[in-house]
Image (cartoon, helix red, strand yellow):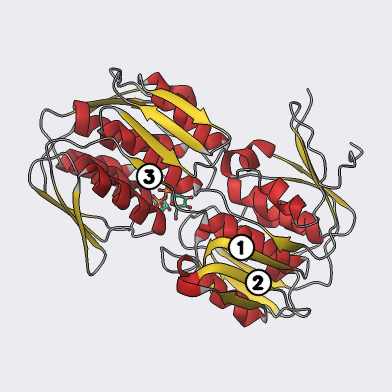
C-alpha cells in the first residue's frame, strides 16, 4: 500500500512575512459550543485542518448544517435541526476533542451518546475530570462496551473543583453550566487563551460568565443562548512553530497578526537562547530575528501561562542545534517524548530520564526517514528537516494534516522546500519547481 509522506529539503535561512490561521484548539471547542444555540452562527478565521473538518462531520451527524466558505475562511453552522445525540464513533476515535460535544448536548437536550474518544498517543489521557464532574451536576451514565450514554433531566449548578486545570474539562463543564439554573463555580480552571476565546463567544451568545482570582470561573446559568458571529483567535501554536522554523534555519520572520502576549514564557526562552524578538503595540505583530549562535536553555511544560506542552516538541529541535546542554521536562502529558527517538535517528544527542529529555547540542542534523506519532511531533520533524543536511522523509502525515492549516505552504512562502505526498495532493514548492518524489 502507498504510504503518505512529507519530503523536507534542507533550507537556507527562512525569511519573510507570514500571517497565522485561526487557532485549531479554539475552533474545535467553539464549533461545538454552537450546539448550545438554535439557528445560524458564523465563525470567521476558521482554520482548514482535518480536525476542524472532523468536528464539522461530527456536528453534521447530530443534524447540524455546515457550510464552509473557503475563500473567506468562514463556516456557517445551522443548529436548527439538531435532533440526534449520538456522536459518530469513527470520528470520536480519531479526535479526542470530540468529547467536547458532551457539555453542549447535555445542556440543550439532556442527552449525549459518545464513544470513548481517541486522538494523539500522548499517554493515558483519561476523561475522568469530565465524567466525575458531570455526575456531580446530576448526569447519569450508562456504559456499554466503549459507548457511554449520558442523560440528565435538569443540570444542577454547583461548586466544581478540578484537581488539575484540564483545558477540555474546564470547557466541557462551562458549556454545560451556561444553561444550568443557578451559579456554577469552577475552581482551578484552565485559563488558556483558547478557553478565554470560548468564554468570549459564550458571552456574545448571552451567557453570564466571570473570571475570578485565583483561576476560578463563575457561571450564572441563563434560559437560552442566541446564535452569533465570532472571529476565532489566531493560532499561538502555529506562531511558535513558524518562529522556531526561522530560529533553526538562522532566519527571520515577521508575523503581523501574531500576538506576543499569549506566548510570553516561550518568547522569554527564545530570548535567553540569544534570539531577538520585538512586538508591536499591545504585543500584536511579532518580529523575530535568529541569532547565529543559539545557546541551550532548559524549561518545563505546564498549564498556561507557563511553557505550552504543544510547543515542547518543536522547541526541542531548537535545543538539539543549540550550544550546550538543556533539560526539557514534560509535566502535562506522561507520554509526550515519542519524537526523541526520531530526532535521535537524525543525529540528535538526547537522553531520556522518565519525563525529562537531556539534550546536548550538535552542529548539524542529518536528513533521514522518520515517523510522526502526534500532531506536534509532526511539526517538530518538519522543522528538524528544514535544518537537517539533505532530505528528510516524514511518515504519519495525517497528524500534520489534523493540526495545521497549510503550515507547509506558509513555510514555503519563507523559502522552505516541503512536499506533502498524500496520494491526493502533490504540493509544489513555492518556486514552482516540481520536487522529485
Ligand atoms: C488540550 C489541547 C491540547 C493541549 C492540552 C494541554 C485541544 C483540542 N487540545 O487538550 O492541544 O496539549 O489541552 O494544553 O484543545 N486529564 C486527566 N483527566 C481528564 C482530563 C485530562 O487526567 O479528565 C489529564 C490529561 O491526561 C493530561 C492533562 O490532564 O495529562 C491535561 O489534559 P487537558 O488539559 O485536559 O488536555 P486536552 O483538553 O485533552
The quadrant holding residue 97 is: top left
Which secondary structure lies at badge 1? strand
For marks 3 and 1, give the CA distance: 22 Å
> Which SS class for mark 2?
strand
Q: Which mark is residue 435?
A: none
Task: Give the x, y percent position of residue 101.
Answer: 34, 33
Name the residue that disc number 1 marks: 255
Give the residue drawn at x 89%, y 41%: 435
Using residue 103 as the reference point, say whether residue 95 is left or right of it. right
Q: Which mark's residue is nearer the viewer, 3 or 2?
A: 3
Q: Is residue 307 left or right of residue 139?
A: right
* Residue under the point 51% across and 48% down: 22
32 up-or-down from 258: above or below? above
Classify 10 Å Cα crowding around label 3: few (below 14), some (14-19), many (20 and above). many
Between disc 3 and disc 2, whose residue precedes?
Answer: 3
Q: How many marks?
A: 3
Q: Which label lies toward us, 2 or 1?
A: 1
**Residue at mark 2 to residue at mark 1: CA–CA distance:** 8 Å
- Where is residue 50? Give x, y as percent: 57, 34
Marks 3/1 in contact by CB < 8 Å: the verdict is no
Q: Quadrant of residue 414?
A: bottom right
Tell me the residue that label 3 is attached to: 230
Task: Check residue 288 in the rendering and tell me which mark sits there, or answer none.
Answer: 2
Q: Is residue 226 left or right of residue 268?
A: left
For the N terminus, the image quarter is top right
Q: Residue at x 67, y 82 (%)?
A: 274
Residue 45 rendering spot, x and y as whole percentages: 49, 45
Q: Tell me whether circle 2 and circle 1 mark residues in contact (CB < 8 Å).
A: yes
Quarter of the image with the C terminus is top right
Observer-nearest of 173 and 344: 173
Amino acid at each position: 500500500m502507498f504510504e503518505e509522506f512529507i519530503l523536507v529539503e534542507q533550507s537556507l535561512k527562512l525569511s519573510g512575512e507570514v500571517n497565522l490561521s485561526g487557532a485549531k484548539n479554539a475552533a474545535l471547542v467553539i464549533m461545538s459550543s454552537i450546539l448550545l444555540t438554535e439557528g445560524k452562527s458564523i465563525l470567521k478565521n476558521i482554520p482548514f485542518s482535518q480536525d476542524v473538518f472532523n468536528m464539522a462531520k461530527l456536528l453534521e451527524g447530530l443534524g447540524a448544517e455546515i457550510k464552509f466558505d473557503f475563500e473567506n475562511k468562514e463556516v456557517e453552522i445551522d443548529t436548527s435541526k439538531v435532533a440526534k445525540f449520538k456522536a459518530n464513533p469513527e470520528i470520536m476515535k480519531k479526535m479526542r476533542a470530540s468529547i467536547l460535544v458532551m457539555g453542549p448536548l447535555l445542556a440543550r437536550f439532556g442527552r449525549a451518546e459518545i464513544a470513548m474518544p481517541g486522538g494523539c498517543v500522548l499517554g493515558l489521557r483519561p476523561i475522568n475530570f469530565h465524567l466525575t464532574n458531570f455526575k456531580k451536576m446530576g448526569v447519569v451514565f450508562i456504559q456499554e462496551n466503549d459507548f457511554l450514554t449520558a442523560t440528565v433531566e435538569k443540570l444542577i449548578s454547583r461548586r466544581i473543583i478540578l484537581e488539575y486545570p484540564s483545558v477540555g474539562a474546564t470547557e466541557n463543564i462551562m458549556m454545560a453550566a451556561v444553561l444550568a439554573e443557578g451559579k456554577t463555580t469552577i475552581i482551578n480552571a484552565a485559563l488558556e487563551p483558547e478557553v478565554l476565546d470560548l468564554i468570549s463567544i459564550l458571552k456574545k451568545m448571552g451567557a453570564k460568565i466571570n473570571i475570578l482570582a485565583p483561576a476560578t470561573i463563575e457561571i450564572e446559568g441563563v434560559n437560552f443562548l442566541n446564535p452569533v458571529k465570532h472571529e476565532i483567535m489566531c493560532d499561538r501554536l502555529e506562531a511558535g512553530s513558524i518562529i522556531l522554523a526561522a530560529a533553526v534555519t538562522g532566519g527571520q520572520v515577521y508575523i503581523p497578526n501574531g500576538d506576543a502576549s499569549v506566548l510570553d514564557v516561550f518568547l522569554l526562552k527564545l530570548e535567553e537562547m540569544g534570539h531577538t524578538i520585538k512586538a508591536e503595540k499591545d504585543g500584536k505583530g511579532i518580529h523575530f530575528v535568529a541569532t547565529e549562535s543559539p545557546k541551550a536553555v532548559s524549561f518545563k511544560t505546564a498549564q498556561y501561562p507557563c511553557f505550552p506542552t504543544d510547543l515542547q516538541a518543536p522547541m526541542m529541535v531548537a535545543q538539539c542545534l543549540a550550544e550546550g546542554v538543556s533539560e526539557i521536562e514534560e509535566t502535562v502529558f506522561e507520554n509526550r517524548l515519542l519524537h526523541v527517538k526520531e530526532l535521535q535517528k537524525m543525529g540528535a544527542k538526547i537522553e531520556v530520564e522518565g519525563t525529562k529529555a537531556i539534550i546536548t547540542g550538535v552542529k548539524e542534523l542529518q536528513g533521514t526517514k522518520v515517523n510522526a506519532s502526534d500532531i506536534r511531533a509532526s511539526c517538530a520533524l518538519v522543522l528538524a528537516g528544514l535544518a537537517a543536511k539533505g532530505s528528510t522523509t516524514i511518515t504519519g502525515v495525517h497528524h500534520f494534516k489534523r493540526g495545521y492549516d497549510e503550515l507547509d505552504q506558509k513555510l514555503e512562502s519563507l523559502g522552505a522546500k516541503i512536499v506533502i505526498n498524500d496520494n491526493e495532493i502533490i504540493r509544489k514548492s513555492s518556486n514552482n519547481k516540481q520536487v522529485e518524489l
